[in-house]
Image (tube, rainbow, N blue to C red):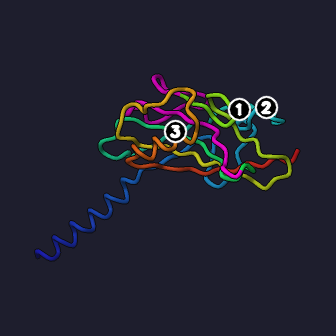
Amino acid sequence: MKLIRTALFMAFSLHTAFAAEFQLTSQDIQANAPMTQKQEFNGFGCSGANISPQLSWKNAPAGTKSFAITVFDPDAPTGSGWWHWNVVNIPAQVQSIASGAVPAGALETRTDFGQSGYGGACPPVGDKAHRYIYTVWALDTEKLPVDANASGALVGFMLNQHQLAKAQLTATYQRSK
């Protein structure tokens, strides 16, 4: 009987661990699928609407004091990728953001477009489809010690120093003209 109870406890524990995985979803973008012109940048030769997608996350780990969102293109022809969006200091009670919105109290930092705010997809014309990695970070601090001028590299360093968990959703985008 003790062996059965132990086996049931272990099975329940494993199920709970998998059920509680930190997850990121979106109503606007799908994993491994092309984004629309709604998420394309408006500038640098691109003519999209430059609207950030709706994002929702769940099952953040215990001890989460804030969240951050980053969007990174590892396929940009720079040798170091391209930061499209960095949002930090999102209050711990926030579980989603609407399309085109930033939660109250959050801070957007500088992207590789040279300014803060969402910078949509804008791969070179004729280049292969680029991957856009949307990441929500669960952090062990309420505020990161950065300001709006912080680079993507500095924000990334701080996020990795305070990360409890992260959830990702990768979408793609390609321009033919």
**Picture disc at residue 155:** 3
- Name the residue carrying label 2: 43
| Quadrant of the rendered image containing residue 119 | top right
Q: Nearer the viewer, residue 125 or 94?
A: 125
Real-space Cα separation, disc 2 to disc 1, in angstroms: 9 Å
Q: Nearer the viewer, residue 151 or 54?
A: 151
**Picture disc at residue 133:** none
Real-space Cα separation, disc 3 to disc 2, in angstroms: 24 Å
Upstream in sequence: badge 1 or badge 3: 1
Q: Position of residue 36 (x, y in %)?
A: 73, 42
Q: Nearer the viewer, residue 113 or 21?
A: 113
Task: Kindly state the secondary structure of the residue where label 3 is placed.
Answer: helix
State yes or no: residue 81 in magenta: yes
Type of residue at label 2? Answer: Gly
Q: Do the residues bearing badges 2 and 1 touch, measured as CB atoms within 8 Å?
A: yes
| Quadrant of the rendered image containing residue 2 | bottom left
Q: Is residue 165 positioned above or below 13 on the image?
A: above
Label 2: few (<14), some (14–19) or many (≥20) C-alpha neighbours in 10 Å: few
Residue at the image position 53 percent from the left and 50 percent from the top: 168
Residue at the image position 53 percent from the left and 39 percent from the top: 154
Task: Kindly state the secondary structure of the residue where label 2 is placed.
Answer: strand
Q: Position of residue 10 (x, y in %)?
A: 24, 68
| Number of the front mark, 2 or 1 | 2
- Name the residue carrying label 1: 50
Q: Position of residue 115 (x, y in %)?
A: 65, 28
Q: Which residues fall within the magenta stretch?
A: 79-107
